[in-house]
Amino acid sequence: MIDLAPLRYFQSAYDTGTFSAAARMNGVSQPSVSAAVSKLEEHFGGALFLRRRDGLAPTALGHELYRQSGAVLAQLSLLEQRLTGRVPQVVRVHCQPDILVASFHAALSGLRRDTAALTFQFTNSCEDADILFCSDGCVPRGCTFHPLWTESYGAALPRDHPLAARPELALEDLEGEPLIARPYCPAADQFLMQGETPACIVAEAAHDAQLLDLVAAGLGVALVPMGHARAQGGIAVLPLRGSQVHRQAGIAHRKTQFAAGIARALCAAWS
């Protein structure tokens, strides 16, 4: 019979990509997670992960166990919730328009799986949120910010744009190019408007997920965080020579015990 704890540790390791992050997520030691995964590998007769310097790479067996065990653990958590009569707690989340929720997929997945008594309510108002996915310059008053990564900005272009094949661009290369504006991040747009022939604004996006789709459709170029290139296959994000535009991104939370606990769990799962 398979113990549930090793399955939870395995799921966390799959989500986070390292045994150490899985250990922090579950409040146990790293050797405990490693031993639990080894126990599962012995039980199923094969490796679940390939151990690499940059983290864990799931094997075919690992992918299948993750797919099958996730539904089982979720059902058991819901059963426990019903039998104990616990009322689901609502986590109110605000995602800044120029932050992609995709950056937190693993963290959200792990938290939801391990805490079935939580429900997530996304809100457009940062004032109503317990948890905020945001950058260092947009942390509301009264919130605590946990930076998770630092990134520079680059120029986003359609994959088939003549400039997309270059390793980097200079600001003058973008003079006269149509611009998709990000009114929620005016500093970035102002940087692209500095040339002798400023870019012409042809559209305004409501958030960066929409912005990337508009760039991929060929409407224009935009200045976006370099990490956004992974979120949309139809674009290229090239570094701008001499650009000093950068930001820190992470998680902020209200100064309540509940919000602080959720933020700690998300940060542990992200790392």
Image: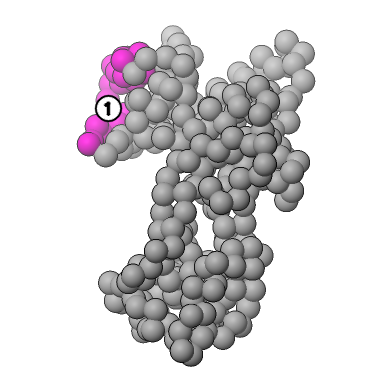
Q: Nearer the viewer, residue 232 or 93?
A: 93
The residue that mark 1 highlights is: 47
Relative placement, left or right, of 86 versus 108 is right
Q: Quadrant of residue 201?
A: bottom right
- Residue 37 picture location, percent across and down: 34, 20
- Which span of residues is magenta-colored? 31-53
The question of residue 33 being in magenta is answered with yes
How many numbered marks does the figure carry? 1
The question of residue 156 being in magenta is answered with no
Q: Is residue 268 above or below residue 141?
A: above
Residue displayed at 48% across by 41% down: 147
Asked if one can make out residue 34 in the rendered structure from this viewpoint, the answer is: yes
Residue displayed at 51% across by 37% down: 146
Q: Is residue 104 above or below residue 178?
A: above
Dominant secondary structure (helix, strand or loop) of the stretch shown in magenta: helix
The quarter of the picture where the N terminus appears is top left
Asked if one can make out residue 11 in the rendered structure from this viewpoint, the answer is: no
Residue displayed at 74% across by 16% down: 86
Q: Nearer the viewer, residue 40 or 210?
A: 210
- Residue 22 picture location, percent across and down: 41, 25
- The amino acid on which the numbered mark 1 sits, given as a three-letter code, is Ala
